Amino acid sequence: MKNYGSPNRLYRNNGDGTFTQVADAAGLADATLGEYHGTICSFADYDNDGFMDVAFSGERNVLYRNSGGTFVDVTAAAGMATSRNSTGIAWGDYNNDGLLDLYIARGTTGSGSLHNTLYRNNGDGTFIDVTAEAGLVTTANTWAAIWGDYDNDGFLDLFVTCAGASALGPGNANLLYHNNGDGTFTNVAAPGGVELEDNTSLHKGAAWVDYNNDGFLDLLVKDGIGPASRTGASAYGYHRLFKNNGNNNHFINVNLTGVESNRRGIGARVTVTFAGGMSFRENNGGGGGEFASQGSEPLHFGIGTAMLASVEVKWPSGITDTIPSVAANSTLTVVEGSQ
């Protein structure tokens, strides 16, 4: 439980429908305590050691590594700067190397120049800031950030909401970064029809969801976010649902059912390999990113024009399931230990 004015709380699942509070939240009690915007945390196993680590946003973004039951602040050691006004957190393997990278959005209710950050995972416990070389430099006032392969080409794209230059509307063009597959991105929000620049609406929440089950991720955008006592009319706004018109690319959807691991397969690492490439996801329950919003399951993979793919699931228990041949445009459920 991420708190603002009181210590954070961590509850251990006893496996019988009850929870036990962990002392000192296993080292997380004071993480971003009392910091404005410091209410977002996102768990992910960035070093692939089988333990879920956690990133926090706030007046400074921080990273805690799970050392096997307790957490240690490794922000500096991991090569991350504690930049101000971090909001949205999005874990995703944008370069398909089997390592989770981290994108941090930054926003504020006041004016000022902010800089979002893409950290590429080096695979040795450290990260490097590749924002500029990836073509993602922006000073927009941004909030939610969510990864999703909206065009099913096998590479994760990135949608980022913008609330305006001073979080009051003007300059509120959203960003849809198409992954070019070479480590760079191109903003296609305007031709994609999701820029929504009206200089009035405060675009803040967002989530990917395939609401019509056609294999292409659709987009939900929420304007405004509370509390109304602090932001007044800025707390309110429209929900907008955008239907993805799709293309000729294919997909694989994966649902997870844990047996020895947790029932929903949180922490499971899934790799889909197909002719011409591979895609990696970790099921952390966030649906591609977290800021006052959450995406839906199943895990979604674009596979381009391929007609077959293999699926490998590595469960938190250490069990590995492999399905060697899955037809394109399939939605499958993998039960832990069944393959």
Image: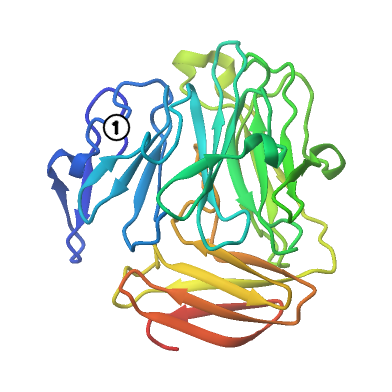
Name the quadrant containing residue 331.
bottom right
Assess disc 1: are there few (<14), some (14-19) or many (≥20) residues with their C-alpha within 10 Å of its C-alpha: many
Residue 182 horizontal/vertical position (percent): 73, 54
Q: Would residue 299 appear left or right of 316 to someone viewing this image?
A: right
Give the answer, above or below, for where 14 lies relative to 56. below
Q: Which element carries disc 1, helix, strand or loop?
A: loop
Name the quadrant containing residue 38.
top left
140 and 78: which one is in front? 78
Residue 27 horizontal/vertical position (percent): 20, 40
Residue with the most extreme top position:
111
Figure quadrant of the N terminus: top left
Q: Residue at x 49, y 22 (%)?
A: 85
The residue identified by callout 1 is: 31
Is residue 239 among what the camera can see? no
Residue 189 horizontal/vertical position (percent): 79, 39
Looking at the rendered structure, the number of numbered marks drawn on it comes to 1
Give the answer, above or below, for where 95 lies relative to 312. above
Q: Would residue 181 appear left or right of 106 to someone viewing this image?
A: right
Q: Would residue 78 appear left or right of 114 to someone viewing this image?
A: left
- What colouring method underlies this structural image? rainbow
Residue 6 horizontal/vertical position (percent): 23, 26
Q: Residue at x 18, y 58 (%)?
A: 18
Q: Amino acid at mark 1?
A: Ala
Q: Residue at x 39, y 62 (%)?
A: 267
